[in-house]
Image (cartoon, rainbow, N blue to C red):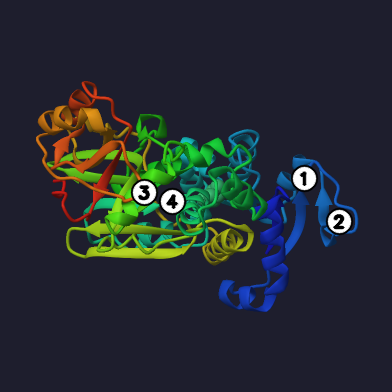
Amino acid sequence: MKVAILGYGTVGSGVFEVMRSNPEGIARRAGEDIEVKYVLDLRDFPGDPVEEVLVHDFAQVVNDPEIGVVIEVMGGVEPAYSFVKEALLKGKSVCTSNKELVAKHGAELLEIAKQKKENFLFEASVGGGIPIIRPLNQSLTADEIQEVTGILNGTTNYILTQMRDEGTDFKDALADAQAKGYAERNPSADVDGYDAGRKIAILTSLAYGMQVDYEDIYTEGIAKITREDIAYAGALGAGIKLFGTSKTVEGKVYAMVAPRMVGKEHPLYVVDDVFNAVLVRGNFLGDIMFYGKGAGKLPTASAVVSDVVDAVKHQGVNVMTIWNSRKLELADINTLKNCFFVRVPEHEREKAQSLFEVDCEVKVQEISGEYAFLTKPMTEGSFKKAASKAKVLSRIRVENVKGAGEPM
Ligand code: HSE
């Protein structure tokens, strides 16, 4: 089997390295040798082993009948979408790590692959090296999925961990994550939660078999999380994590991305640094968790190469993936119940106690001049209404934190 890699950036060079480092093992699992015939990139890489196979023209790749699998690791929607579509229409399978592409055009590209009896595979698009797409498609098929909650962005998890453990500034921790190849070209996608939003959109689409548009998902990032918030979380025996969540409550599907203060009993509490984890709740299975490196060159490349092996094993056979283009209408999050950690200035103590019907207090020795508390479960809508009447310094949704009730 001859394959082509589109893009020689962080992930592309990782795929090239993995394919060249472990050819026998990969061939054994795929049932035949796999050779990288082309790597497509606009740039030149003098002195790099990729030079032998480097090409600059997509037509050369897509018109070569020897190429059976195209590996798209360029990122971004265009030209990736046009290239992938053309490759599928020409009867080649495609493996991609590109979450923007999958979130936006996954349903259509899967349909083309099905018609052509080829495969469109995207294991690396969510959770980096963690197998989660294939388990959702092929293993968790007896259950109705009731909830998918994940720490889906390695960069923000790395930043939050550094801020907690090293007292590092937000900026320094981000620069470090960029240097390690975790962050997006525009790190706002990480920090503002959009990357996690695309990933939870993909997982939710697969869980329900319908199209979830990431633009419809309520999304908050970590830019407003302060050292004070982290200190309060510490006092509560909790950590702050960016969660992408979708869940069914009373027949309605909710999806959101937002930071959470999570207590030690929450299965995702222990997930630090660049690690990602995805918790899936099935109606028969209960909870199951997937954990591993969610970003970085080689873990992501490993997931891409696992798709290449799958594509080679299934030549001429489409592995069915249920994700049609019918849109899944998400429920209004204003009706979703959550518990909140809230900080207000000290002079608003009594007002806040009456607005939120609370009398508890969360204290941190070195922080003064403010009143912090945990609410009981309340709908997002009623929280917003109460919060609009006070000067809220910060608020974070909480889970498994002692002193807070649990949301429904
Ligand atoms: N920027 C992403 C992250 C890369 O930090 O998780 C992997 O999708």
First-in-chain label (1 vs 4): 1
Classify mark 4 as within 8 Å of ligand 1 or not, answering yes or no: yes
Q: Which residue is mark 2?
A: 51
Mark-to-mark CA distance, 4 and 2: 34 Å
Name the disc covering residue 152, or none.
4
Mark-to-mark CA distance, 1 and 4: 28 Å
- Residue type at numbered disc 4: Leu
Q: Secondary structure at mark 3?
A: loop
First-in-chain label (1 vs 2): 1
- Residue type at numbered disc 3: Glu
Whether residue 332 is visible: no
Q: Pick whichever, 311 or 388, lies toward us.
A: 388
Q: Secondary structure at mark 2?
A: helix
Mark-to-mark CA distance, 2 and 3: 58 Å
Q: Which residue is mark 1?
A: 41
Q: Is residue 121 above or below residue 358?
A: below
- Residue type at numbered disc 2: Glu
Q: Nearer the viewer, mark 3 or mark 1?
A: 3
First-in-chain label (3 vs 1): 1
- Residue type at numbered disc 1: Asp
First-in-chain label (4 vs 2): 2
Mark-to-mark CA distance, 3 and 1: 53 Å
Name the disc covering residue 366, or none.
3
